[in-house]
């Protein structure tokens, strides 16, 4: 059982669990804090997903064996891109693991 906060996160869990080589998924696995422009920022990614063997589809999206995942609707991600990108960059730098954004187009199979 994996906790989720939205229908899109629920669908993301199903999408990732259906991929070949899937190992496990952890909800809100870590929180990081960093300072930018003199202000402390805190970020908790939606998931950590672990694969025994990463499928080609996910490799193309930046996945490795252990990858942090942020789930957002595409429109929201575009509107908040500077913040989203900074969070993912700081998380990847702090943990040494990739951090990727998945939106409804990928999760629900409507990727271009």
Image (tube, rainbow, N blue to C red):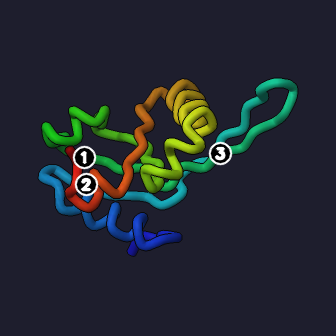
* Left or right: 66 in relation to 52: right
| Residue found 41% across the figure and 32% down from its top | 98
* Left or right: 30 in relation to 2: right
Q: CA distance from mark 2 to mark 3?
A: 24 Å
Residue 52 image-quadrant placement:
top left
Contact flag, marks 2 and 1 (Cβ < 8 Å):
yes
**First of labels 2, 3 by sequence position:** 2
Split into 4 quadrants, where in the image is the N terminus?
bottom left
**First of labels 3, 1 by sequence position:** 3
Q: Which residue is mark 2?
A: 23
Residue 93 rendering spot, x and y as whole percentages = 54, 24
Residue 23 image-quadrant placement:
bottom left
Question: Does residue 18 show up?
Answer: yes
Front position among marks 2 and 3:
3
Q: Which residue is mark 3?
A: 43
Residue 41 image-quadrant placement:
top right
| Residue found 48% across the figure and 71% down from its top | 6
Q: Which mark is residue 51?
A: 1
User: Badge 2: how crowded within 10 Å, few (<14), some, or many (20+)?
Assistant: some
């Amino acid at each position: 059982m994996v906790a989720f906060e939205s229908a899109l996160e629920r669908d993301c869990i199903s999408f990732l669990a259906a991929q070949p080589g899937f190992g496990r998924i952890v909800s809100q696995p870590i929180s990081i804090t960093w300072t930018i422009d003199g202000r402390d920022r805190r970020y908790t990614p939606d998931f950590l997903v672990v694969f025994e063997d990463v499928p080609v589809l996910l490799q193309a999206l930046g996945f490795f064996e252990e990858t942090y995942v942020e789930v957002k609707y595409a429109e929201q991600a575009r509107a908040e891109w500077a913040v989203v990108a900074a969070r993912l960059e700081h998380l990847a730098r702090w943990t040494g693991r990739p951090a990727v954004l998945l939106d409804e187009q990928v999760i629900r199979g409507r990727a271009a």
